[in-house]
Image (tube, rainbow, N blue to C red):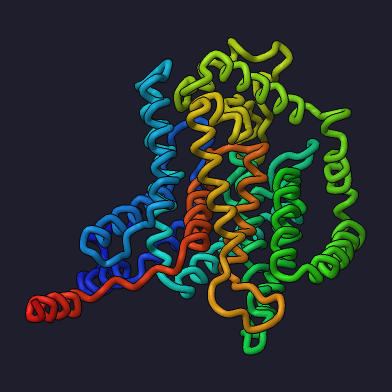
Amino acid sequence: MALTLSALPRPALRRALPALADRPSLLAAATVLLVCVPTGEKDVTAAVHVTAADVASLALVALTALNLLRGRLPALGRATCALFGGIVVAAAVATVGSIDPATSLTGFVRLTQVFVLVPAAVLCSLRDRGDQRLVLGSFVLAALIQGAVGAHQYLTRTGASYTGQPIRAVGTFGALDIMAMSTVVSYGLLAALALALGERRPGGNVRLRRAMFTAAAFLAFPLAVSFSRGSWIATGVAATVLLLRADARLLVRGAVLGLAAAVVLVGGLGLGASGVTERLSSIGSVSAAPDQSVSDRYDLWATAGRIWQDHPVHGAGPKAFPKLRDSHAPLRLSSGSDAADATIGFQREPLLSPHNMYFLVLSEQGLIGITAYLALFLGLLLGCLRSRPGPTPGPGHRDGPTLAALALLSWVLVDFLYADIGGTTTVLTSVVLGLAARAAAPEPAPPEPEGHAGAERGERAMTR
């Protein structure tokens, strides 16, 4: 039975609402954790499907708008407004010039939610380091939940099918959202590692550092048995950026520890026999001898390129790729990808996107769209790299939340090379963009109390 606000005791409701208004980051953290709520046997990648995390994110947007109107939050900076505004303009132009404006309108709403409204709301909700650590902690907790479920699936052979065996860890998401668990686990691993590195300083929290290092080490196992080459690559790149940013000397130590962990996982726990080594070695053959999934991606990218050539300026319109795929795709493209587990049995899922965010934007929003998105991504990345919040207590020390924002943004940008938005974890991309925007922006000034502002206005009037 769904829990509604009316079902809550009135005293509890009166206490909860002011708490959310005073600390909206609680809703941002709830958005992350609610991703773990099972969505049932629905294909969340092929149709509009509102999840509990989406509802929480929209509640965060509404609360942020209310707080902004009441003057309880500082206004967004001009540069931030320009970057987010560019996304809205590009999506709007693409929708107006779409081959199917009615269908593209729903895509416009979704793009605005994912890349503008929710990131801006997260940015406004993160008013101090405590808020940032709260949201990052929710990433770690969600990853531990999904990682534990995924590890159990692998060990008990109750996961999704991989090479004919039910060993692929998918967490609570099921075989129809095959990438979701690896995404959540990757985010949690990077957040834990960044928080741990942020405590490597005199006076740092030793218990927190040890707990985060332990969490990151545990999450390496479910990430390995997710058999997601894309998540492995993105996590490796993001972890390298994180270690270089925190302390270049740590990169060598991290490489040694990573090699030791690989020996333990592959040799000691027998992951080599289950296909991890074969899957890992296949990364090097994606150009010379690609498997069917990689070959299909290449064909989908070529299809997106052909669609863009027909609509170069503003694209074909949001959600237009599935309509134009068959008329622009090569004949060898597969009709769909296989999905199977004990719950859904065997299903054939259609390929409805190019599995590359940059090609998706180029084909559906044209040069105007890709320019706006690249400006947003580059602006956030450079802002995170320039950010140096507060004094550095020790040599090589960096702030944990800032490190985490840089690592998570790096993961998203690499993952977008072979994936795009869609599925249960899409809203997590919005939260990551919000964290990156906060790290890139200057520290917000606390809103001025109304009484103090009134007193100052009175003093100025008396002076005049």
Residue at image location 63% in from the left, 32% down from the top: 355
Q: Nearer the viewer, residue 257 or 211?
A: 257
Q: In this rendering, is residue 401 above or below 431? A: below
Q: Kindly indicate the quadrant of the structure image that contains residue 281.
A: top right
Q: Is residue 241 visible?
A: yes
Q: In this rendering, is residue 342 above or below 243? A: above
Residue at image location 38% in from the left, 53% down from the top: 78
In this view, the residue farthest toward the front is 464
- Tally the marks: 0
State which quarter of the image contains the N terminus: bottom left
Horizontal side of 433 relative to 243 (left or right) equals left
Q: In this rendering, is residue 429 above or below 299? A: below
Counting from the top left corner in percent of width and height, residue 37 is at 49, 53
Q: Nearer the viewer, residue 386 or 408?
A: 386
Counting from the top left corner in percent of width and height, residue 346 is at 66, 31
Residue at image location 85% in from the left, 53% down from the top: 271
Counting from the top left corner in percent of width and height, residue 454 is at 14, 76
State which quarter of the image contains the C terminus: bottom left
Counting from the top left corner in percent of width and height, residue 216 is at 70, 67
In this view, the residue farthest toward the bottom is 203
Horizontal side of 224 relative to 30 (left or right) equals right
Q: Nearer the viewer, residue 128 or 420?
A: 128
Q: In this rendering, is residue 58 above or below 404? A: above
Q: Kindly indicate the quadrant of the structure image that contains residue 266.
A: bottom right
Q: Is residue 36 visible?
A: no
Q: Kindly indicate the quadrant of the structure image that contains residue 298.
A: top right
Residue at image location 39% in from the left, 25% down from the top: 95
